[in-house]
Image (cartoon, rainbow, N blue to C red):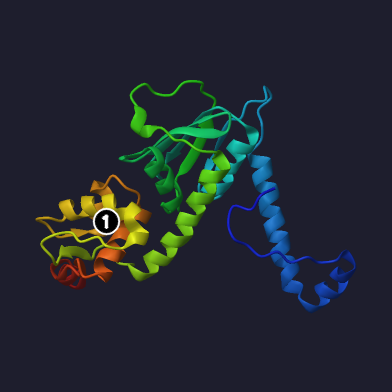
């Protein structure tokens, strides 16, 4: 097996387990819970009698990484659908022999949709995977995905971890982005790949002050790229993030 993110590994010799049980009994409770959860997932994610994979379940019980790894390890071809708590579809991804080939997440398509799948907080809702051999004709080239399944998973997890750090610094999605300069000056050589994101945000916020939540709905990029670009724009004085005082007063009155 290959690790999908940075981790540390601790080895325990079998002969040391009795002493470890006496010294740290809570460790074995933790280990038992983890093993039980994996057994539950293994039982739920089973192959049908014809050896095709038909998955369905609640996102409260399965995380996206587990679902994704199950599909790629089984080398299945089919469509993964993610729905919200009301049953409305929010994303669809087509896999060919375990590799994602096409995808959409809300208004995003292709790689941006794939990154957003892992950035989104799936606190409720459901998922299903059914065997299909054809993609929808209306998806178009913009929805295409390239790269190896393991490689893009590693990148997605890396983005998710970095996004968690960014979200701690920029935690209020209602704060509004306001331009402070006439022209966009993007000089950081280490973040040139984010220039198209900054240019899009610059145009969207040209006349109106937009919140991060509004940028999420109007941008063609995933939240990780939006937050990184906004963080750099605020750091360099291109923009400021301010609280909507009218909304704050309304909230306080309520």
Which sits in the foreground, 11 or 213? Answer: 11
Q: What percent of the width, then of the height, locates residue 181? A: 13, 65
Q: Is residue 122 left or right of residue 55?
A: left
Which residue does the image show at 81% across and 66% down from the upper left? 12
**Res 56 visible:** yes
Residue 16 vs 152, above or below: the answer is below
Which sits in the foreground, 239 or 73? Answer: 239
Farthest residue, direction bottom: 23
Q: Is residue 24 left or right of residue 90?
A: right
Q: Is residue 145 left or right of residue 108?
A: right
Q: Is residue 195 left or right of residue 84?
A: left
Which residue does the image show at 26% across and 48% down from the upper left? 217
Which residue does the image show at 45% across and 34% down from the upper left? 93
| Res. 35 image quadrant | bottom right
Q: What percent of the width, then of the height, locates residue 249? A: 15, 72
Q: What percent of the width, then of the height, locates residue 220? A: 28, 44
Residue 31 vs 155, above or below: the answer is below
Q: Dot 1 corresponds to which residue? A: 213
Quick one: label 1, few (<14), some, or many (20+) residues within 10 Å?
Answer: some
| Res. 245 image quadrant | bottom left
Q: What percent of the width, then of the height, locates residue 51? A: 67, 25
């Amino acid at each position: 097996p290959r690790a999908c993110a940075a981790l540390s590994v601790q080895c325990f010799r079998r002969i040391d387990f009795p002493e470890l049980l006496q010294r740290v009994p809570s460790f074995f409770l933790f280990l038992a819970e983890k093993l039980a959860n994996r057994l539950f997932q293994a039982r739920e994610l089973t192959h049908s009698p014809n050896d095709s994979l038909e998955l369905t379940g609640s996102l409260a019980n399965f995380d996206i990484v587990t679902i994704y790894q199950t599909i790629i390890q089984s080398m299945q071809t089919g469509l993964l659908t993610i729905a919200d708590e009301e049953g409305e579809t929010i994303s669809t991804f087509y896999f060919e022999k375990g590799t994602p080939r096409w995808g959409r997440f809300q208004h995003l398509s292709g790689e941006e949709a794939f990154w957003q799948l892992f950035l989104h907080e799936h606190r409720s809702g459901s998922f299903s995977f059914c065997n299909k051999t054809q993609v929808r004709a209306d998806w178009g080239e913009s929805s295409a995905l390239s790269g190896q399944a393991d490689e893009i998973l590693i990148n997605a997890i890396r983005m998710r971890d970095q996004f968690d750090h960014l979200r701690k610094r920029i935690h209020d999605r209602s704060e509004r982005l306001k331009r402070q300069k006439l022209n966009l000056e993007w000089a950081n050589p280490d973040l040139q790949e984010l220039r198209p994101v900054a240019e899009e945000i610059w145009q969207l916020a040209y006349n109106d002050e937009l919140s991060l939540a509004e940028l999420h709905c109007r941008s063609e990029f995933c939240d990780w790229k939006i937050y990184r670009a906004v963080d750099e724009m605020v750091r360099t004085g291109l923009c400021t993030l301010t609280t909507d005082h009218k909304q704050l007063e309304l909230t306080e009155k309520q």
